[in-house]
């Protein structure tokens, strides 16, 4: 496969500036230039983050014809059988962090994980290519967001081997652990390995 892309700007189709800022920091380490575009992403209902990310990437590409990334992420809580998972966005908007903590009030098992799927699509590809990242951790007992940096479920998620929640970390610190950073690093390594 011959790629014309190397050295060009790629685009991250998202409406979430926090996701963009985290990704940009990772990609800059690999000298990959990224721009944010707010095309309308089509989020199908599916149990699979990969299916959601791939469908969104094709949908976004049809609108702008640019080499782009769509990322779909979710929080999977063990004691809730993986809920909210692919429904994280909806659950965050409706019951939010307080609602999730309430659901887990009497739950001793606090194990949870974040997953991220980065889907990249460009004219050189027949189908989007996906890269996955995951981080295990636990749901805290209360909101912890001193000097709040993050977004979404960051105030209630503490990655394993850390004393801090994601919301208590700078972007650089969060990127040492996060699902998103892991997926974007995999993407960056693949992208840098392409032949011109
Ligand atoms: P897009 O426009 O890119 O779709 P989004 O905010 O809807 O942005 P996702 O669908 O990938 O993002 O994520 C679903 C929800 O999961 C999101 O709204 C957050 O509440 C939560 N989430 C994802 N990644 C997170 C992270 O790193 N920290 C905290 N919450 C996160």
Image (cartoon, rainbow, N blue to C red):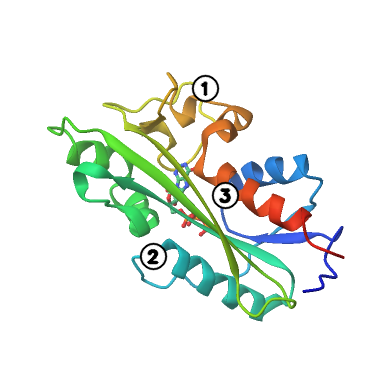
Q: Is residue 60 left or right of residue 31?
A: left
User: Marks 1 and 3, how far apart in space?
Assistant: 26 Å
Q: Residues within 10 Å of mark 1 (few under 14, many from 20)?
A: few
Marks 2 and 1 sit apart, C-alpha to C-alpha, by 34 Å
Of badges 1 and 3, nearer the viewer stands 3
Between circles 2 and 1, the one closer to the viewer is: 2
In terms of secondary structure, where does tag 1 sit? Answer: loop
Q: Earlier in the sequence, mark 1 or mark 3?
A: 1
Q: Residue at x 34, y 28 (%)?
A: 143
Residue in front for this viewpoint, 100 or 74: 74
Residue 90's x, y, as percent?
35, 58
Residue 48: assigned label: 2
Q: Is residue 128 left or right of residue 65?
A: left
Residue bearing the label numbered 1: 147
Looking at the image, which residue sits at the far left?
A: 106
Instruction: Pick whichever of labels 3 and 2 is earlier in the sequence.
Output: 2
Residue placed at 40% from the left, 28% from the top? 160
- At horizontal 70% and vertical 51% (from top left) the residue drawn is 188
Task: Specify whether residue 20 is in view.
Answer: no
The image position of residue 181, as x and y in percent, is: 59, 42
Locate the N terminus by quadrant: bottom right
Q: Is residue 53 above or below residue 79?
A: below
Disc 3 to disc 2, how far (Cα)?
A: 16 Å
Which quadrant of the view contains residue 130?
Answer: bottom right
Q: Nearer the viewer, residue 100 or 137?
A: 137
Q: Which residue is mark 3?
A: 183
Q: Which image quadrant is residue 34 in?
A: bottom right
Name the quarter where the C terminus is drawn.
bottom right
Q: Position of residue 184 (x, y in %)?
A: 62, 49
Residue neighbourhood size for the residue with mark 3, other residues' Cα within 10 Å, grouped as few (<14), some (14–19), many (≥20) = many
């Amino acid at each position: 496969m011959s790629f014309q892309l190397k050295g060009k700007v790629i685009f991250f189709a998202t409406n979430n500036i926090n996701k963009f800022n985290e990704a940009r920091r990772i990609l800059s380490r690999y000298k990959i230039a990224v721009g944010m575009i707010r095309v309308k992403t089509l989020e199908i209902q599916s149990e699979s983050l990969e299916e959601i990310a791939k469908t969104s990437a094709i949908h976004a590409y049809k609108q702008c014809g640019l080499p782009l990334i769509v990322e779909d992420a979710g929080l999977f809580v063990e004691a809730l059988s993986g809920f909210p998972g692919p429904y994280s966005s909806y659950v965050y908007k409706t019951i939010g962090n307080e609602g999730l903590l309430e659901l887990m009030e009497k739950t001793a098992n606090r194990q949870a994980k974040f997953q991220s799927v980065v889907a990249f699509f460009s004219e050189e590809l027949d189908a989007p290519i996906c890269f996955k990242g995951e981080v295990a951790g636990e749901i805290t007992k209360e909101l912890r967001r001193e000097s709040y940096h993050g977004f979404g479920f960051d105030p209630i998620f503490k990655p394993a081997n850390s004393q801090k929640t994601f919301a208590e970390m700078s972007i650089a610190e969060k990127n040492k652990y996060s699902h998103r950073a892991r997926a974007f690093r995999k993407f960056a390594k693949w992208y840098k390995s392409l032949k011109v």
